[in-house]
């Protein structure tokens, strides 16, 4: 652990039904809801069966969720990750450390590349991903609908190769 996490215990575990209410609360905070749509009724337990989800606990409390998807075609094999973090634990090195742990797990599963696609304006998230070693690949214009569905915003495609993890 170490790296910027001062007196905090970080645990990464498979998503449990008991985490749902806390994750829905975090998702509803303005700083998170700005980037994520309102959750489907089944969130976080049954709305996305193609993703593998983990809950991150900080000092025993649910602090965020990270999920990954896998492309298993041998020619294009890679993983993609997505996450959200409770604003109350930001700026303490928790995000990069959890992303590192998931990246190590995905590389051990045989992936050589991991992608992530934050909103291009989400500077805090981009900085956290760069701390882990993700590199900017390019801007995807009008990539994603804004929360609420009124317009579109750009996305930033980022990737991390196995040998680049920091």
Image (cartoon, rainbow, N blue to C red):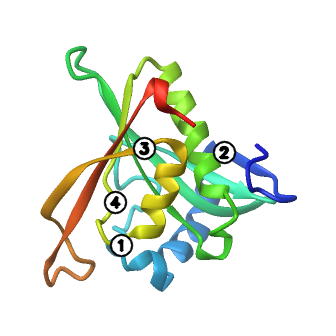
Q: Earlier in the sequence, mark 1 or mark 4?
A: 1
SS assignment at label 3: loop
Q: Tag on residue 12?
A: 2
Label 2, label 3: how many angstroms apart (C-alpha)? 20 Å
Q: Quadrant of the C terminus?
A: top right
Q: Nearer the viewer, residue 98 or 166?
A: 166
Q: Earlier in the sequence, mark 4 or mark 2?
A: 2
Q: Tag on residue 35?
A: 1
Residue 70, horizontal then vertical, whole percent: 34, 32
Judge whether 95 appears above or below 145 on screen.
Answer: above
SS assignment at label 2: strand
Label 4, label 2: how many angstroms apart (C-alpha)? 21 Å
Quarter of the rendering containing residue 21: bottom right
Q: Earlier in the sequence, mark 2 or mark 3?
A: 2
SS assignment at label 1: loop
Residue 93, horizontal then vertical, whole percent: 67, 57
Of the residues tagged 4 and 2, which is closer to the observer? 4
Residue 138, horizontal then vertical, whole percent: 21, 51
Q: Tag on residue 118?
A: 4
Label 1, label 2: how many angstroms apart (C-alpha)? 23 Å
Q: Tag on residue 8?
A: none
Q: Is residue 15 visible?
A: no
Q: Residues within 10 Å of mark 2 (few under 14, many from 20)?
A: some
Of the residues tagged 1 and 2, which is closer to the observer? 1
Marks 1 & 2, CB-CB < 8 Å contact:
no
Of the residues tagged 3 and 1, which is closer to the observer? 3
Q: Earlier in the sequence, mark 4 or mark 3?
A: 4
Q: Earlier in the sequence, mark 3 or mark 1?
A: 1
């Amino acid at each position: 652990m170490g790296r910027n996490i001062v007196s905090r215990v970080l645990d990464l575990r498979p998503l449990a039904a008991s985490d749902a209410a806390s994750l829905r609360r975090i998702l509803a905070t303005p700083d998170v809801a700005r980037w994520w749509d309102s959750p489907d009724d089944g969130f976080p337990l049954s709305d996305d069966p193609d993703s593998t989800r983990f809950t991150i606990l900080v000092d025993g409390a649910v602090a965020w969720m990270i999920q990954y998807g896998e492309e298993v075609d041998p020619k294009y094999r890679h993983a993609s990750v997505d996450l959200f973090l409770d604003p109350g634990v930001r700026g303490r090195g928790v995000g990069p450390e959890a992303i590192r742990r998931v990246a190590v797990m995905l590389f051990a599963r045989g992936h050589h590349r991991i992608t992530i696609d934050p909103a291009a304006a989400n500077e805090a998230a981009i900085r956290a991903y760069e701390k882990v070693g993700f590199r900017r690949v390019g801007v995807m214009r009008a990539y994603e609908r804004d929360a609420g569905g009124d317009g579109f915003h750009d996305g930033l495609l980022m990737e991390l190769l196995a040998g680049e993890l920091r």
